[in-house]
Image (cartoon, grey):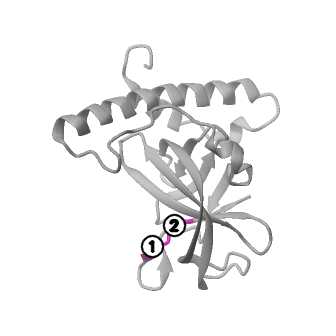
Amino acid sequence: MNESGDYKASNKALNGIRVADLSNHGFGSLKTEYFQLQKSNDAFLLKKAKKQNQATGTNTGSGTTDLSTNNSFSSYPKFAGDYEFYNYDPDRLQSDLVIDSDGTVLQENTDGSSFHGVATISGINEGNVLSYDVTTDTNKTKKITANVKVTVTWSNGENETYYGYMSYDGNAVLTDGKSYDGDLVNEVWVKY
């Protein structure tokens, strides 16, 4: 499907494969191929989204979209890796988040679908960002000081920002800092 230009269908077929299964012994080359195909699909989908945004005049930010992977995570290797959605709820879409060292992002969802994108990371020092106290396994919220900002450009052209910090137990945590359903936090991801 990728060769015929049907990138969405190709990504849909990839969605049927659980990335966690590809981490098992003997599947390394398949996992590499999976991410290369995903990157190829997403690059073409991002190009298409960029052209549509330029045609409709709805560009956001600086007006440019980085369509390729990057090396920004080489300066922040602790924030690349596999994350799980904190406060997992089968009624919510989010399940797992994988950020590869080249900025490739895969979000696996509770309904079996997945989202693909490319992320950049930069250092910041921003206080009063809403998150959970992830060391307590509760819904206790707290304000944190973020050390990094991760901006994800999804294959549909939308951007999403996460703020990253290290928890007291030494795990990388990403939060979008937005409140959800009253006193909860919209998205918090903990690296495992």
Q: Find numbered disc 2 in the image and state the secondary structure of the residue it sits on.
A: loop
64 sits left or right of 11 in the view: left
> With respect to residue 132, does 69 lie above or below?
above
Residue at point 38%, 14% (across, down): 4
Mark 1 lies on residue: 178
Question: Compared with residue 86, is residue 158 higher up or lower down, i.e. above or below?
Answer: above
Residue drawn at x 70%, y 39% as measured from the top left:
21
Q: Is 174 located above or below residue 55 in the figure?
A: below
Q: Is residue 140 magenta?
A: no
Query: Separation of disc 1 and disc 2 at Cα?
Result: 7 Å
Estimate the x, y position of residue 40 in percent, counting from the top left.
Answer: 49, 25
Dot 1 or dot 2, earlier in sequence: 1
Q: Mark 2 packing: few (<14 Cα in 10 Å), some, or many (20+)?
A: many
As drawn, is 93 to the left or to the right of 85? Answer: left
Single out the mark in the foreground, 1 or 2.
Answer: 1
Kind of residue sitting beneath label 2 = Glu
Q: Residue 64, how many percent across, how many down?
A: 36, 39
For label 2, the residue is 187
Do the CB atoms of the residues marked 1 and 2 lie less than 8 Å apart?
Answer: yes
Is 99 drawn above or below residue 90 in the view shown?
A: above
Q: Residue sitting at 82 percent across and 33 percent down?
A: 25
Q: Which residues are magenta?
A: 175-179
